[in-house]
Amino acid sequence: MTSCLRFSVAAACIALTVAPAVSQEPADQAAVQAVRQTGGQVLEVAQNDPRLDVAFHLSNVELTPEILKTLDGVKARLAHLNLRGTNLNDDLAQYLKPLTELTRLHLEKTAITDAALPNLAGLQKLEYLNLYGTNITDAGLEPLGGLAGLKKLFVWETKVTLDGVRKLREQLPELQIIGGPEEPKPAGPKEAVEAPKPAKT
């Protein structure tokens, strides 16, 4: 009996350790329903993870300020947001600023430019950011330098240069930048020149 009790206590401690650090209050069902009514798909991140994953990339919905404001109602648990291929632009990007619990954000194939990126500067829990196929340049990377938790950044088919990649890596040396310009490979060792054979006499 004692050993069972110890096991239960230990298991409870482990569960507390791995549980995501989010509010244990359930998301208001009216707020979740409000997002769904706009065309957003709302799911929990995983069976034992109460955080939310919201996606608009398959809904064919044209985003508006009113639609994006509905995310405020679930922002305490909103961890993943997928806006891939939507009409998100620099003006609409301001509505991402309050979503400070985000860890994963898809903005690929949207109309954003460098002007949108300062709105992400306060998303300190962000670990994954996809900017593939946008008009981001080196200037757009600058606000990302303060995101200490950022682990993966996708910049395929953007206007980011090697210089911009270098500067961001100086600030975030652990960041994996995918699809950006690569450092030139160092030249291999020169082939040894064969010594001339002595002339026959």
Image (cartoon, helix red, strand yellow):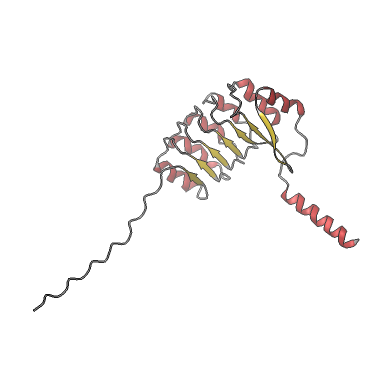
- Percent position of residue 156, x then y: 46, 38
Q: In which quarter of the image is the C terminus?
A: bottom left
Taking 180 as reference, is 55 left or right?
right
Say which quadrant the N terminus sits in.
bottom right
The extreme left residue here reads 201
Q: Residue 40's quadrant in the figure? A: top right
The one nearer the camera, 150 or 34, is 34
Q: Is residue 196 above or below residue 125?
A: below
Residue 152 appears left or right of 135: right
- Return the x and y of residue 148 as percentages of the image width and height: 56, 45
Total labels: the figure holds 0
Where is residue 190 shown, x and y percent of the image?
28, 62
Residue at (87% x, 62% y) in the render: 3
Q: Position of residue 94 (x, y in %)?
A: 57, 27
Out of 74 and 117, give the one closest to the viewer: 74
Q: Please identify the quarter of the rendering in which residue 180 is found.
A: top left
Which residue is pictured at 63% across the width and 33% down the height? 99
Left or right of residue 29: residue 71:
left
In the orientation shown, which residue stands out farthest toward the front? 200
Q: Tell which of 101 and 15 is nearer to you.
A: 15
Q: Between residues 97 and 9, which one lies in front from this camera angle?
A: 9
Instruction: Tell which residue pokes out farthest to the bottom in this image.
Output: 201
Whether residue 52 appears in this view of the structure is yes
Q: Identify the residue at image location x=85%, y=59%.
A: 6
Q: Is residue 75 visible?
A: no
Looking at the picture, does residue 61 appear above or below residue 150?
above
